[in-house]
Image (cartoon, rainbow, N blue to C red):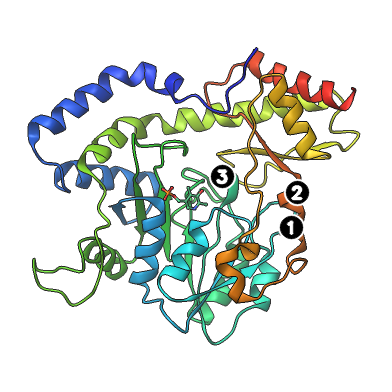
Amino acid sequence: MRVPFMDLGRQHAPLRAALLAKMAEVLDSQGFILGPAVADFERSLAAYCGTAHAIGVSSGSDALLVALMALGVGPGDEVIVPSFTFFATAGAVARVGATPVFVDIDSRTFNLDAEAVRARFTERTKAIVPVHLYGRLADLDALRTDATARGIAILEDGAQSIGAEGPDGRRSGALGTLGCHSFFPAKNLGALGDGGAVTTDDAALAERVRVLRVHGSKPKYVHHLVGGNFRLDALQAALLAVKLPHLESWIAGRRANAERYRALFAEAGLVADGRIVPPDDGPGRHVYHQFVVRAAERDALKAFLEGRGVDTMVYYPLPLHLQACFRHLEVRAGELPATEQATAEVLALPIFPELTADEQAYVVESIAAFYCR
Ligand SMILES: *Cc1c(COP(=O)(O)O)cnc(C)c1O
């Protein structure tokens, strides 16, 4: 058997006719830049996230960048970020000329450790960028009061967490000052190309993001701000509008697969002996963008599974504080121990919604075969 890490073909097959019809509609409309397709999708997305505003942008990376620009973050400012995340989280901070301040994670949740964040507050701290890694919400309640009191903005990196809910039902993208979303094809809600969005309840910030998205132009050819071309394509917006109504069922599929993995691990005795540590489901609703286990002998296990036809991934093998481009920040190896340990132990298993029970059984059987070899 061969188990792919993901297979968008299975997701798109039943939507093929609807997606092709939308492509034809956009083609015939000749409206390729912003316009009603983008505005319609923005309204649906804001309703889904439970925010007053949603602004479609060119990617998740640009969502982070334009949100930092809207907050006025720049040279001399510090922005607290995890080191255990995709590069864009810290890359966006560096691109606006501010300083990323890397903080360690909580080993159990893989998300920013609230205590460690508080310890790094200075008078220069302008924002915190919590990442809801793998689709599990970071604990913002533990930070919101202190951040607000100090005038520190919370910018959610929700690239992996659309639809994730806190215990009170509030969703990713509605929990901070601004929320950033990615529609990279492999994300839980993927476009057929690049795309992203910023959500917020703050009308003034929403307006700044809208203006920055078109080079800071308002009215046309008049610039009070320097922005960029951060627009979401009308074609991608139209395709995302076809896919958004299915997101809830895809999330349910991911959650059911996570449950099945837990049961299969327990049955195989892999959890009891501590060689596999499945992810904590957490309070609220984890959306399992990734199902990431900690595994003893991770690299050998990954190679063994590859030999059995099971694709797995490592998110992320090198922490950001040890990347060459951030060497000047002088964060040394050993300073963020939970992050560094995670990079050595994490392994993402296939979890896409259309994964079958047989495929999952084969994955767990193969893992058991590794530890019993
Ligand atoms: C995917 C991702 C991004 C960037 O999104 P793009 O749409 O690929 O630019 C940012 N942060 C995290 C945590 C991500 O997983």
Please identify, in this view, whether the residue under mark 1 or under mark 3 is nearer the observer.
Answer: 1
Please tell me the numbered disc located at residue 135. Answer: 3
Relative placement, left or right, of 86 versus 205 is right
Hey, what amino acid is under mark 3? Gly
Q: Secondary structure at mark 2?
A: helix
Dot 3 crowding, Cα within 10 Å, few <14, some 14–19, many 20+: many
The mark nearer the N terminus, 3 or 2, is 3
The C terminus appears in which quarter of the rendering?
A: top right
Q: Disc 1 versus disc 3: distance between alpha carbons?
A: 20 Å
Q: Which residue is mark 2?
A: 344
- In which quadrant will I find the N terminus? top right
Residue found 58% across the figure and 76% down from its top:
146
Looking at the image, which is closer to me, 151 or 332? 332
Vertical comparison of 351 with 88: above or below: above
**Mark sitting earlier along the chain (1/3):** 3
293 on left or right of 257 = right
